[in-house]
Amino acid sequence: MASKTGFTKAFSQVASGTFISRVLGLVREQVFAHLFGATMAADAFFAAFRIPNLLRDLFAEGALSSAFVPVFKQEMKEKGDASAFELASVCFTVLTIVLAVITIVGAAVSPYLVDLVAPGFGGIAGKAELTTRLTVMMFPFLLLVALAALAMSILNSFDKFSVAALAPAMFNVGGIGAAYLICPYLKEPINGMAYGVLLGGLGQFIVQIPGMYRLGFRFRFRPDFKNLGLKRIGKLMTPMVGGLAASRVNILVNPFLASYLSAGAVSYLTYSYRIMHLPLGMIAVALGTVALPKASSQAVDGDQAGLANTFYRSTQLCFFLVFPVAAFFVACGDDVVALLFQHGHFLAEDTAETYRCLVWYGIGLIGFAGVRVTAPVFYALKNASRPMRYSITAVVVNLLANFAMVPFMGAGGLAAATSLGGIINYYLLVAYLPKLVPSVQLSKVWSMFIRSTLASAMIAVALLFISHAAWFEAIGSHFWGRLIRMTVLLVVGTIGYILISIPLRNLPRRDGFRAAPPPIDSDV
């Protein structure tokens, strides 16, 4: 097991692997944007992929991973690795059976799902039909990526983070490869991207098999639906589905409303969301991935002070790294979008619309990231009902804000509403945490928040001043000009943020935190 000093090292491993995967993801999006732009085919693909991808996000990589690790770790500590591997075989078997059935049913009812997700497509000749066909083709992705997520959870439980973090890169490799090796040879090139999704999901699972084998895991077909460990996972997983819904509800709601807006609205939201997901995955998801098995072990041992310390370290690293990224998106997001996507069929007006969405997603990044590093503490303590309640509250706020903002802000209003829901969800989780872990002091959290906010705000103002200076704009709007502009902004922003953080005492502490003792009158 990882030592207490291994937290930062483990985070670095996951962050590095995730960075490679996300960079490849952006390359995949660049290739896609170059080939398909913000056309009808692009809208259809994005809407179709959201259906199996939403189920994957909630039930596979989301709830399944968060529910499996605490139970698996408990099984390891109480009964040994052999018993834990037996549970893993049961989970692999049952998961395959259940998701195979869901895939078949989902493919059969795809026309109705498309009408639900993107009803506005029906008014454009051929758009709904194309979306339905792509949905059917990509539905098996749910099964493939769920198996990959379970494999990742097993490796993470043994503190083997590197391979699991790199595995998602295979999905992006599949997409990039399909764009050049499959799409050009098809009558409808967009179908090739659907094949790329399936190949990527399969590769994501296969690359993790050797790692599990080295740990001693040997798969056995065990369709034991009455297994006690499986029941514990299912019981914990059910409320987690609701607890993880706040930051995902836009995956269905946004395309639904965007389908009624101008052509390209679905694509603008998708491209901006992808950009926001690069730091979210590399920082917050990586921190949550490392924190969950560590917090689960501390929960089994009853180490409240250790739990508080894990939360503090995750939160400080999250704030220190995420806040300046959010500020950068707000101040320089147009340069980011132009550099990444303004090629081929992706035009300047597409950049402007995508940037409007990215500004709001950038602000919401703080909430999305905060949820990712706070929720694992609840899950480690097998308290999934509280995150579920707060998620439902955030979803309601999100929906109401959607209808209030869209008439005035268009696609940007959808992004703003999603971000508002994420921020509220995070605030509610943090506010309740001391009742669950009395050693946690909110004053420390707010101190980290304020210092990171001040440092990020100051560097954002400086970057805005630079990006609008005449000499800076004279660099040019061609590719190399954009690359130079982005390099200057990143270098100045990074150095400036670190220098500002020193007097503000905003740099992460290497020695962790000394958790306060629980209050004597605690009712927890």
Image (cartoon, rainbow, N blue to C red):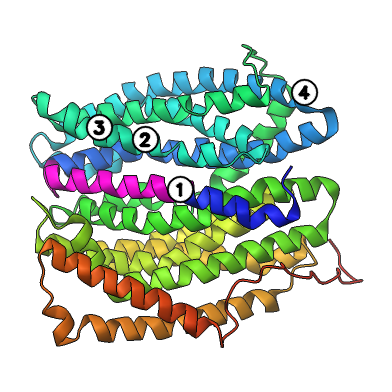
**Disc 1 packing (10 Å; few <14; some 14–19; many ≥20):** many
Q: Earlier in the sequence, mark 4 or mark 2?
A: 4
**Residue type marked 2:** Phe
C-alpha distance separating marks 1 and 3: 19 Å
Q: What residue is shown with label 1?
A: 18
Q: Which residues are magenta?
A: 17-40
Q: Quadrant of residue 514?
A: bottom right
**The furthest residue to the top:** 221
Question: Would you say residue 399 sits in the magenta stretch?
Answer: no
The residue tagged with tag 2: helix, strand or loop? helix
Q: Residue at horizontal 11%, vertical 69%?
A: 477
Name the mark on residue 83.
Answer: 4
Name the mark on residue 177.
Answer: 3
310 vs 472, left or right, is right
Question: Would you say residue 24 sits in the magenta stretch?
Answer: yes
C-alpha distance separating marks 4 and 2: 31 Å
Q: Earlier in the sequence, mark 1 or mark 3?
A: 1
**Residue type marked 4:** Ser
Q: Is residue 348 above or below residue 61?
A: below
Name the mark on residue 171.
Answer: 2
Q: Nearer the viewer, mark 4 or mark 1?
A: 1
Q: Earlier in the sequence, mark 4 or mark 1?
A: 1
Residues marked 4 and 1 touching at CB (< 8 Å)? no
C-alpha distance separating marks 2 and 1: 12 Å
The residue tagged with tag 3: helix, strand or loop? helix
Residues marked 1 and 3 touching at CB (< 8 Å)? no
Q: Is residue 280 above or below residue 107?
A: below
Residue 242 placement (x, y as % from top left)? 55, 47
**Residue 377 showing in the rendered view:** yes
